[in-house]
Image (cartoon, helix red, strand yellow):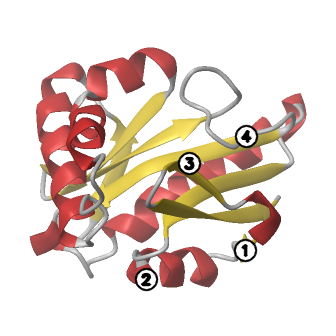
Amino acid sequence: MSIEVRDAVPAEYDAVGKIVAAAFAADGQLDAPDSVSYRDVLHDVAARAAAAEVVVALDDGVVVGGVTYVPRGGPMADLAREGEAEIRMLGVAPDAQGRGAGSALMRECIDRAARGRATGTRRVVLSTNTVAHGSHRLYERLGFVRDPARDWAPVPGVDLLCYVLDL
């Protein structure tokens, strides 16, 4: 098995939206009262692709995961400050988890950020729900560290943790 990662094409947006929403739901990240509207945001991959980079993971040519990479500020950045890239909405199909797709997507985002060092990118940031313990382990395994001073809550009842990786 070999995971391929590349930019998503419009024909894959529907699959990516469904996969990311299913991954968030399976992890308990859509249990908060405001989760209905966030589920819609997760499904709207075309809007993300218009403002950032959407990357897919494929296993034997089948989309099994996706992530949104924000190389610099803009409407898709929640946390990124000057000199920071941001990773958002990482999701792998529940039946494909544990096969390396999440790691491959994260490494691709880190590589993109590293290529941005020439234009001033020095750090990668992301936020994650407090209940996403598997994601926390992945981020820490890749060298991300918690930055509790940047934790935040987009809506009441949804607490997000900040992780950072210095390049």
Which residue is drawn at the image coordinates 57% and 74% (left, top)? 139
Residue position marked by numbered label 1 in the rendering? 146
Q: Is residue 64 visible?
A: no
Which is more N-terminal, label 1 or label 4? 4
Within 10 Å of the Cα at label 2, are there few (<14), some (14-19), or many (20+) other Cα atoms?
few
**SS at mark 4 in the image:** loop
Query: Relative to the observer, which residue lies in front, 117 or 122?
Result: 122
Find the distance from the CA under tag 1 to the CA under tag 3.
Answer: 14 Å
Q: How many marks?
A: 4
Find the distance from the CA under tag 4 to the CA under tag 1.
Answer: 15 Å
Which residue is drawn at the image coordinates 22% and 42% (left, top)? 39
* Mark identifier at residue 80: 4
Q: Amino acid at mark 1?
A: Arg
Image height of 123 relative to 116, above or below: below
**Discs 1/3, front:** 1
Q: Is residue 150 left or right of residue 21?
A: right
Q: Is residue 122 left or right of residue 70?
A: right
**SS at mark 2 in the image:** helix
Q: Amino acid at mark 3?
A: Ile
Within 10 Å of the Cα at label 4, are there few (<14), some (14-19), or many (20+) other Cα atoms?
many
Residue position marked by numbered label 3 in the rendering? 87
Residue position marked by numbered label 2 in the rendering? 133
Coordinates of residue 158 in the picture (x, y in percent)? 45, 59
**Discs 2/3, front:** 2
Q: Which image quadrant for residue 148?
A: bottom right
